[in-house]
Amino acid sequence: MQRKSQFTDIEGPVHYIDYGGEGSAVVMLHGLGGSHLNWDRIGPGLAADHGAYALDLRGFGLTPLEGNTASMENQVELVAGFIRKVAGGRATIFGNSMGGTIAMLVAAEHPDLVDGLVLFGPGLPPQSQKALSKQNLMFLGFPLLPAVGEAAMQRYFDSTPPEERIDFMMQKMTADPFRIDNYTRESLTEMVRLRNDMEWQAAAYCQALRSISSVLLRRSSFRRIIHKIAAPTLIIHGMLDDTVPFESGEWLARERPDWKFAPLMDCGHVPQLELPKRSLNLYRRWRDQELVTSS
C-alpha cells in the first residue's frame, strides 16, 4: 500500500499521512513535539485492516499554526473536523501522550464520531513527585512561563543539533533506544531540520503545553471527562515510562475498570515506536474482542 502525504483544510491547512487501506477508519494523534512520523512503525500494519491516517496536529509536524493556536480546544476541533471530512464520519482514535489526552477529549465531546480509543501512555494528571524529574522540568516546566518559555525553547531549538535532539529524546522516551531503527531515526531527524525553519515551533510547543497542563491539573474536571467517555478503550502503558509514569496509567485503569489495561513491562513512553509488533498485536486482540462484539 502506498503511503501518501496530503493536506486538507480545517480552519487552515492540516497535514496528514494516508497509509491506504480500506475498512473502518483509524486516526492517529502524536504527542507534544511529535508528528505523523511517530506512527510510521504501525501505520502500514493498521492499513491492512483499516483506512489509516496519521495527523500532524496544529502547530506540529508540517501543519502550521496559520493564525490559530495549539490549544487543546483547537486540537479537539481539528480532529473532529478531520474525522468528519476525511475519515468518513467515525473512527477509532489512537493517541500517544498529548495525543491520548486529545483523543479522550474528542470522545467525551463528540461521542458520535468515535468507535473506540487506543491510548499509548496518554497524558494524565501526575500522581506523585515522580513526574517532576529534572528532564521533565526542562521540557514540561519552563515552557509554562509566558514569554520566558518561548524564548527558552527557541534557544534550545537553535542551539541543539537535530541529531542530538533525537538522540536525547530516544534516550528519554524509550526503555531501549536501540529498538528504534536507523530509518525511523533519520526520518525523525529530518523532521527536526524542517521544523527549524518554521517560525511557529516554539510558540506551538508552549501553547500546547500550557493548555494541556490546564486540562490535567484540574483533576476533578478531568475525572468527569474520563467518566463521560462511552467508547470502548484500550490503554497501552510502558512500565518504564519516564514522561507519564506508569502509576498514572494505573490510576486511569482504576478510574475506568471497564477499559482494557495492557502494561508493557520493558517499554517506555512510545510503545508504538519502541514495540510496534507487540502494540499491533495488543490492538488486534482487543479489537476482535471489544469492537467487533460492541458493534
Image (cartoon, rainbow, N blue to C red):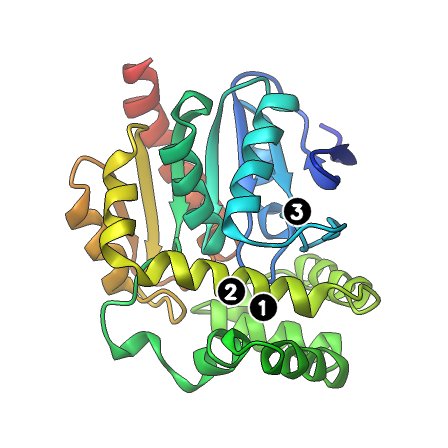
Residue 129: give its label.
Answer: none
- Residue 31 in the image: state x and y as whole percent: 53, 56
Mark 2, residue position: 209
Q: Residues within 10 Å of mark 3 (few under 14, many from 20)?
A: many
- Residue 288 in the image: state x and y as whole percent: 34, 23
Q: Residues within 10 Å of mark 1 (few under 14, many from 20)?
A: many
Helix or strand or loop: what does disc 2 sit on? helix
* Residue at (48% x, 68% y) in the render: 173
Q: Marks 1 and 2: CB-CB under 8 Å? A: yes
Please say whether residue 284 is visible from this viewpoint: yes
Quarter assignment of residue 230: top left
Left or right? Give the position of 142 relative to 243: right
The earlier-in-sequence mark between 3 and 1 is 3
- Residue 59 in the image: state x and y as whole percent: 68, 55
Three-letter residue code for mark 2: Leu
The residue positioned farthest toward the right in the image shown: 197
Three-letter residue code for mark 3: Asp
The earlier-in-sequence mark between 2 and 3 is 3
Mark 1, residue position: 206
Left or right? Give the position of 111 relative to 276: left
Mark 3, residue position: 56
In which quadrant will I find the N terminus?
A: top right
Please say whether residue 47 is visible from this viewpoint: no
